[in-house]
């Protein structure tokens, strides 16, 4: 028996594993998730996780929470780039703008906040205080 035949794959190397990422899953693997993390397989290929229809939502949600970019594609299908989040869209839009444009937008937002915030605080604060006092805004019959 050759050494290659007896060699065990490490936990970091998963290029041949095409079953669902979740060990207790008996469903057919339908999705391939290629992660853009710096960690790669020993052969240089990107870290790829496989999952079924039942678990791909959970796995992609965990990757998004961790801030990891990934490519979701059906097994043996074309690659689908996940849509950007609103925060990423805003960052892309702002990064290409000039300093003066950014300064104008941010100062406008701060100014509007300064002008509107006191009135909103007074309105909702007084509404809360009146509710605590039991006043409903109706005339009471004596």
Image (cartoon, rainbow, N blue to C red):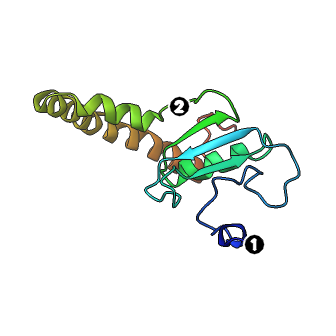
Residue 16: x and y, percent?
68, 53
Q: Secondary structure at mark 1?
A: loop
Q: Residue at x 61, y 37 (%)?
A: 72
Q: Residues within 10 Å of mark 2 (few under 14, many from 20)?
A: few
Quadrant position of the C terminus in the picture:
top right
Q: Residue at x 52, y 30 (%)?
A: 83
Q: Residues within 10 Å of mark 1 (few under 14, many from 20)?
A: few
Residue 26 got which mark? none
Q: Quadrant of residue 17?
A: bottom right
Q: Nearer the viewer, residue 108 or 102?
A: 102
Task: Point out the frontmost of discs 2 and 1.
Answer: 1
Residue 1 got which mark? 1
Relative height, residue 57 to residue 39 (above, below): above
Can residue 142 be seen in the rendering of this structure?
no
- In the drawing, does residue 34 fall left or right of residue 8? left
Residue 81 got which mark? 2
Relative height, residue 57 to residue 89 (above, below): below
Q: Secondary structure at mark 2?
A: loop
Relative height, residue 8 to residue 136 (above, below): below
Quadrant position of the N terminus in the picture:
bottom right
Residue at the farthest front position: 1
Residue 78: x and y, percent?
61, 26
- In the drawing, does residue 27 fall left or right of residue 20? right
Q: Residue at x 70, y 47 (%)?
A: 50
- In the drawing, does residue 28 fall left or right of residue 121? right
* C-alpha distance separating marks 2 and 1: 44 Å
Residue 122: x and y, percent?
38, 42
Relative height, residue 25 to residue 85 (above, below): below
Q: Quadrant of residue 28?
A: top right
Q: Nearer the viewer, residue 99 or 65?
A: 65
């Amino acid at each position: 028996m050759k050494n290659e035949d007896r060699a065990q794959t490490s936990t970091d190397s998963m290029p041949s594993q095409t079953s669902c990422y979740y060990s207790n899953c008996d469903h057919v693997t339908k999705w391939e998730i290629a992660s853009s993390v710096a960690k790669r397989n020993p052969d240089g290929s990107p870290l790829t996780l496989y999952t079924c229809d039942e678990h791909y939502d959970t796995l992609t949600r965990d990757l998004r929470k961790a801030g990891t970019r990934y490519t979701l594609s059906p097994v043996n299908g074309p690659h689908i780039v996940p849509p950007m989040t609103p925060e990423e869209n805003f960052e892309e839009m702002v990064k290409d703008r000039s300093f003066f444009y950014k300064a104008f937008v941010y100062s406008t937002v701060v100014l509007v906040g300064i002008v509107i915030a006191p009135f909103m605080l007074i309105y909702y604060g007084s509404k809360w205080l009146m509710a605590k006092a039991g006043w409903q805004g109706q005339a009471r019959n004596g």
